[in-house]
Image: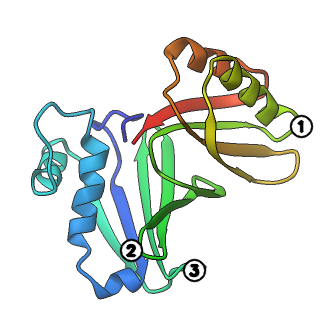
Amino acid sequence: LNAYSPTGAGPVAVEFSGALLDHPISPLTAAFLKGCLEGIVTEPLNRVNAPILAREMGLKIQEVRASDAIDYASLITTRLRAGGHQRTIAGTLFGKRDLRIVRLDDYDVDAVPSGEMLICSNDDRPGMIGGLGTLLGEAGINIAQLSLGRDRTGGRALAILNLDSPIDPALLERIRNLRGILWAEQVSL
């Protein structure tokens, strides 16, 4: 949501499936909204006031219950439409504590949602990850983890990199200007 203006945003759908349906889902929706609104609103946020603030901002929240979590015991999928774009993210829990992002938009991934992250989309061709790694290495930024997804060979790809330190704006701009990079964003969790 941070990439979109909350005013004019379409409905936010939060879909729950699998074993999650055996538990109350409203607290999970509230936690999701709290995370979405951080950095957008100036008021202190918590899981109680986040749904209220979202409604006051005109966001419509849809809680969806789906019976099957395809490929996972439990799955939470969120969808946001704004400005003619849609962003989808799905996550699950491996074991009892291992959170994972397993889908971002149209890409299957296996990423840890933690710390400093670089998320970028690029042409799927040799050397793209090498170019990213070179720029990060020259800046003294270590890659802690990397997850890749692509739509098809030679098509479009998505990379999610967990980093040991944040990227400064000038480096992010250099990454965005690499030949073949379609977009790149830094996320801090």
Whether label 2 touches label 3, CB < 8 Å: no
Percent position (x, y) of residue 18? 44, 83
Residue beneath disc 1: 126
Q: Residue furthest top?
A: 170
Amino acid residing under circle 3: Ile
The quarter of the image holding the N terminus is top left
Image location of residue 49, percent across then percent down:
10, 51
Q: Percent from the top left, x then y, of residue 101?
A: 52, 58
What's the distance in space between the residues labelled 1 and 2, CA to CA?
Answer: 37 Å
Q: For the residues carrying marks 1 and 2, which lies nearer the camera in this image? A: 1
Q: Amino acid at mark 1?
A: Pro
Query: Label 3 belongs to which residue?
Result: 70
Q: Which element carries disc 2, helix, strand or loop?
A: strand
Q: Earlier in the sequence, mark 2 or mark 3?
A: 2
Quarter of the rendering containing residue 133: top right
Residue drawn at (44%, 42%) of the image: 115
- Foreground mark, 3 or 1? 1
User: Residue sitting at 79 percent across and 22 percent down?
Assistant: 179
Residue nearest the viewer, comparing 133 with 80: 133
The residue labelled by disc 2 is 16
User: Spatial distance from mark 3 to mark 1, Cα to Cα?
Assistant: 32 Å
Residue at image point 36% right, 61% down: 13
